[in-house]
Amino acid sequence: MALYGDYRPKTFSDMVGQDAPKNTLLNAIRLGRLSHAYLFCGTRGTGKTSSARILAKAINCTNITETGDPCTQCELCILAETDRLTDIIEIDAASNRGIDEIRDLREKVSFAPNTGKAKIYIIDEVHMLTKEAFNALLKTLEEPPHHAYFILATTEYHKVPDTIRSRCQTFFFTNIEKNDIVDRLQYICTKENFEYTQEGLEIIAKRANGGLRDAISLLEQSSTFGPITAEHLQQSLGIISADFLETFLTHLQKGHSNEAFAQLEALQNEGRNIQEFGKDFLEYLQEIFHQYIAEKNALLPWIIEVITLFEEGLQRSKRFEIPPLALEIAITKTLLLNKEFTNQLTHISSHTTTHTEENITNNTPAKKEKEKEKEKENNQSPSIEKTTDDLSPPPIPSSQQSSQENPPWDNETTQTIPSNIIPKNEKDSHTTENQNNHLIQQQKENNTIDPIDPPEPDEILPIVQSQWKTLCSMLPKTVKLYLSEYGSAIEYTDGILTIEIKGDFAKKLINTEKNITLMREKFSYFLNTNLQIHIHEKQETTANTLSHEEVEGLLQF
């Protein structure tokens, strides 16, 4: 006999979990208030059929315990446990689903029990009955003989007709908690002298998805391979290791397409189930998602998009003739998605390479004088600890940006600065370009940027494009970071400045009434011109190695 059969519970007290159905049935037995029909619902391996057999045994038991459990010692209990009690009839509705079988049941239900006190019909997978069979069962369920009880079990409650549900007491069997499954597996391992580790049992419990029968079956299978450890489970059950999943996610973050595809190909060569890998990876992404929420990580929007892409890929893999192709498409879409989060991903992958360059650029005499002035100001006023409650990405030092090779979608053409953007008080001083940049930087620090002379309408767009960073610096922190990275001015017509945004998340964050009003006020002040702001989402999907048409076709898949 299979191991789960040997350890099937014989009383309600032996059952793992399911406290609500268990306690209700025990009280009904103890108080003698049993219903004539019950409907047990729940996923596989949660104790529905076991509970039905225990309840049938308790109804016929001649020596019920004080708690309501069957004694397991009387003659009727022994006959029930050995499947020799003819008054307990089990029917598999999956193979006996027609109206003829239900008619036969109706004819025999009126006969008195042969040996026991009552006749109990256990109909498993009752949702498989035909419509005609359900209709034939209705009258018997509504007014059964006093010696007859019906216990129906199903994994698909929604397929049971309302007319059947209304005639039964319904109990829902929930998934068994992971800790309860681990405790039961430990008990079995001790009884069977299996070598095991706690980590190995936890992996099995997680794999069982709340079903104790599945967990015991996996335990029996893995025990024949050797000691029940995480390493052996990866080989015997094909479970993907956490290190493999972490490496795969790192390749996606860094844009290493060849390495990500190589990992997927390695799984196929080993004969692993691609859909199981997709499920394991989604569970791993769920853990990262919760971690990013707790940390207020700037990559939270990115991980949400990746989860969505791989969930869609996993569902499509079930319909594809070549299942790995669906996940390969999900990988490609993720790599294309990275262009919207270039700075955040670059900040993660090259965090340690910037400090040396930053120190070199900070050793100029002018920089040292500024630092001394700032130290004096800090000594005169108490320090204030800055905290952030938003999800904006951390700013990247300019040295880091220069040290990294910009992706093709971030390349910008250099534009000349028109002469009339120089502030009024400096326009006639013949300052050099470096002096002008130094003045703008100083005004940014003091949060006082002077307006320019009113430009001609055809000069407004070039001015905005060349001074985009300056204009964005006048806005609040979160809007400034996202607008400067993902926004650009593309058109100025009839007093309306059109701004293009890359990505849904950035657009949703920026395109609010409050932010639009703020941008209109700041931009109008700087340009000395009354203008309106219009936000337009950027529909850019091109990549470095694909044509525009190819990528458009891929993303519309």
Image: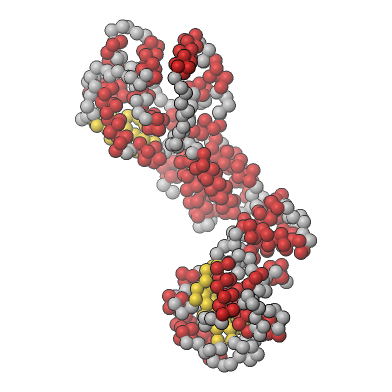
Q: Quadrant of the N terminus?
A: bottom right
Which of these two is toward me, 537 or 262? 537
Residue most extreme to the right: 193
Task: Pinpoint residue 258: horizontal percent, then vertical percent.
Answer: 58, 38
Task: Pinpoint residue 92: horizontal percent, then vertical percent.
Answer: 58, 78
Residue 330, can we see it?
no
Residue in view at x 76 percent, y 55 percent: 227
Residue most extreme to the top: 429
In the rendered view, tell whether residue 391 sits above or below residue 191: above
Which of these two is toward me, 231 or 24? 24
In the rendered view, tell whether residue 513 sits above or below residue 459: below
Task: Pinpoint residue 9: horizontal percent, then vertical percent.
Answer: 67, 71
Which of these two is toward me, 276 or 271? 276
In the rendered view, tell whether residue 467 sits above or below residue 74: above
Which of these two is toward me, 384 or 502? 384
Examine the image and state in which quarter residue 193 appears.
Answer: bottom right
Residue most extreme to the left: 494
Residue in view at x 55 percent, y 35 percent: 254
Residue in view at x 71 percent, y 49 percent: 231
Residue in view at x 50 percent, y 51 percent: 311
Examine the image and state in which quarter residue 418 appears.
Answer: top left
In the rendered view, tell whether residue 313 sits above or below residue 405: below
Task: Pinpoint residue 237: horizontal percent, then vertical percent.
Answer: 68, 56
